[in-house]
Image (tube, coloured by chain):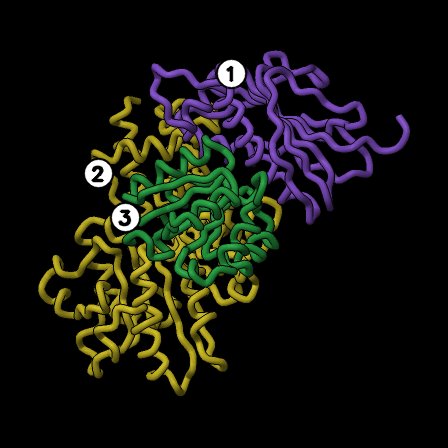
Chain colours: A green, B yellow, C purple
Amino acid sequence: MRAMIIDDSRAMRSILRRIVTDLDFETSEAEHGQAALDQMYAGVVPDVCLVDWNMPVMDGYTFITEVRANPEWRDVTLMMVTTESEQRQIVRALAAGAHEYVIKPFTPDAIVDKLSLLGLVPA
Amino acid sequence: MTTSTAFASVSALVRRETSMVYDEGKEYLVEARLNPLAAARGLGLEEYVARLAFDADERRKVVDALTINETSWFRDHTPYQAFTDAMLPALLERRQITRRLRIWSAACSSGQEAYSIAMLLDQHLPPGWSYEIVATDISTAMLERVRAGRYSQVEVNRGLPATSLVRYFTRVGRDWEITERLRERVTVKHLNLAAPYVGLGSFDVIWLRNVLIYFEAATKQDILRRMLPMLADDGYLLLGSSETTLDMPADLAAAWQREQIGRVPTYRRASAARSLTPSLTSTGA
Amino acid sequence: MSAVVPEVEVPASEDVLAVTEDVWMALLGDDAPLLPRTVAPGAPFDVAAWSAATTISGGWQGVVTVELDEALARRLTMRMLALPADEQASDSDVADAVGELVNMVGGNVKSLMPGPSVLSLPAVAAGRAAFSSDSALACRVDLVWQDAPVRVSVHVPQEGPR
């Protein structure tokens, strides 16, 4: 399994990388949505993206919309990992095509649980 | 009072009031759960335990703290999948007349099991059907939580699908509150599993998960024996993934017939004549 | 723990405290508790070496600021980046980590206030936080973690002539 971690904070990317590496994921990273899209157009297409919402250049919501607009990427699972925690934001992200949503702050178990709900790690 | 006499006195208290057994070796657990209570009183652990003999309020808090079951939404996934994929279709066929299901969440803790089941029934029961979930626990503090149906962000962040979060919960301050529609289906009752089961009625499915491990063998057997008449002839009993009836005395093991649904063992009343569940081999999607 | 600003909705100190504790627990675990610290009202943060702020705008206006002392900021950074003990976190690492900290606290504060609102990207500075003269303190939480102080404050726009 390959995970792309998209967050403008290096520290947060490092936390998420350690969690998914422990689950034997290979990882790639991007510091905003546009950088992630560039990587995907260049052929680095992950099984799952862990996407922050608030980022410079391109935010996570726009990134999700862009990914969902490309039928070639329909198998990519999208999981928001963000401090945005209003109900309406979660509804918006799901409507735009996010499969799961984790609210920051989170414990490592929260990420593992959600990945296992998505069938990406054995329960 | 020394640490080891404190531990002995606490485990005797819990055993007397709940029949749950805290063997030596569980000191760390007792310490972890009692330290905050002692700190709240400004006492060291040993001083606090010495005081319990005279303080019924604190005794109740200790029992509550030590009987809290770790829980999460859709814990272990597979029992819930077996429930929707196999048990529910079978029960829907057999309850055509009454169109009503009754489910027992025994040792319900903070109610995440009961509400997980409620969410599934809300999604999968055909129109015109009704259900009741009876949630019982020995901790009155936990029962209050189930009644309130409020969970912290940390709790809803774990194991609860985001679609269910937005569908069944509303943000209330820092917490998330489960919808009235589900809360009104859950009946909360105070119950010690080691004491008689009175006024509960009978159930189509009993969830008795991850609690038998706390009882000694004789109590465990007694509970499983008294569970038999609580279950409808064609109902299902679910145990925790490390629990089984196989190590029970022969008559009791024979009274519970193990029936595998995918990877999930369920237990059914052997005496009751009935046809096997359809889609026995279903492992779900 | 809080000053009063009339006619503007402000977050409760206990909510800001709880949000901060959640963030702390997630980042640093529970091996050491975050304890309250008594500080005179109006006293500037005495040991600020790092400060980070995020602005909430829309249905509710406010600025959430986290200030913390040098050693704490570095420890937090080491922990978040999982750096080995013999390595040093660079200033840019610290700025990144402290920025993510205020992002988490700020986002959760935003969710408690009327919306919809937008959360800005964090602005991080070495040194004490500078507060705009047309803003007023709405709520302040002073804490200490392993002897190192940390302060979270929320400012709202000042109403009317001053």
Name the residue carrying label 1: C148
Disc number at residue B23? 2
Residue A33 spot, x, y in % from top left:
52, 45
Residue B245 spot, x, y in % from top left:
17, 61
- A112 relative to C46 in the view: left or right: left
Disc 3 to disc 2, C-alpha distance: 12 Å
Name the residue carrying label 3: B19
Q: Disc 2 on helix, strand or loop?
A: loop
Mark 1 or 3, which is nearer the eye?
Answer: 1
For badge 3, the amino acid type reads Ser
Up/down of C127 relative to B243, above or below: above
Up/down of B196 relative to B257, above or below: above
Q: Residues within 10 Å of mark 3 (few under 14, many from 20)?
A: many
Seen from the viewer's position, the closer of residues A89 and B31 is A89
Seen from the viewer's position, the closer of residues C115 and B203 is C115
Q: Chain of mark 3?
A: B
Query: Residue at position x 49%, y 67% from top?
Result: B185
For badge 1, the amino acid type reads Ala
Q: Chain of mark 2?
A: B
What residue occupies the far top of the structure in this picture? C46
| Residue B10 seen by the camera | yes
What residue occupies the far front of the structure in this picture? A42
Q: Chain of mark 1?
A: C
Q: Quadrant of the N terminus of chain B?
A: top left
- Mark 3 vs mark 2: tell me if same chain: yes
Q: Disc 1 on helix, strand or loop?
A: strand
Q: Disc 3 on helix, strand or loop?
A: loop
Disc 1 to disc 3, C-alpha distance: 45 Å
Residue A25 spot, x, y in % from top left:
31, 44
